Amino acid sequence: MTQKKLEIMSDLKSEIKNLPKKPGIYFFKTR
């Protein structure tokens, strides 16, 4: 469970760096 969560967080961080103009997507995916 923790490993998967870390992977998801890493993926989200990657998306954020690629889409810094759309932080809404990050919050939406995190929730």
Image (tube, rainbow, N blue to C red):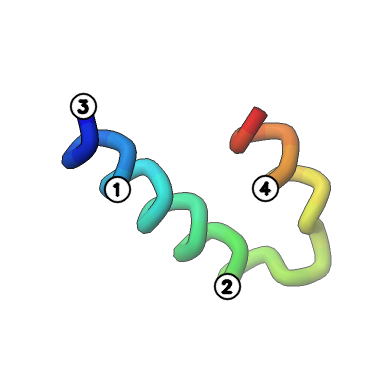
Q: Which mark is residue 1?
A: 3
Residue 19 in the image: state x and y as whole percent: 67, 64
Foreground: disc 1 or disc 4:
1
**First-in-chain label (2 vs 3):** 3
Foreground: disc 1 or disc 2:
1
Residue 15 in the image: state x and y as whole percent: 54, 58
Q: Amino acid at mark 1?
A: Leu
In space, the residues marked 1 and 2 are separated at their CA atoms by: 16 Å
The residue positioned 46% from the left and 64% from the top of the image is 14
Question: How many numbered marks have been drawn onto this rendered protein structure?
Answer: 4
Q: Secondary structure at mark 2?
A: helix
Whether residue 28 sits left or right of residue 8 in the image: it is right
Q: Which mark is residue 26?
A: 4
Q: Quadrant of residue 4?
A: top left
Residue placed under numbered mark 1 in the picture: 6
In space, the residues marked 3 and 1 are separated at their CA atoms by: 9 Å
The residue positioned 17% from the left and 40% from the top of the image is 3
Whether residue 15 sits left or right of residue 3 in the image: it is right
Q: Are circles 1 and 4 on residues that touch, CB within 8 Å?
A: no
**First-in-chain label (2 vs 4):** 2
Q: Amino acid at mark 3?
A: Met
Residue 10 in the image: state x and y as whole percent: 37, 57
Residue 19, compared with residue 2, is above or below; it is below
In space, the residues marked 2 and 3 are separated at their CA atoms by: 24 Å
Q: Secondary structure at mark 4?
A: helix
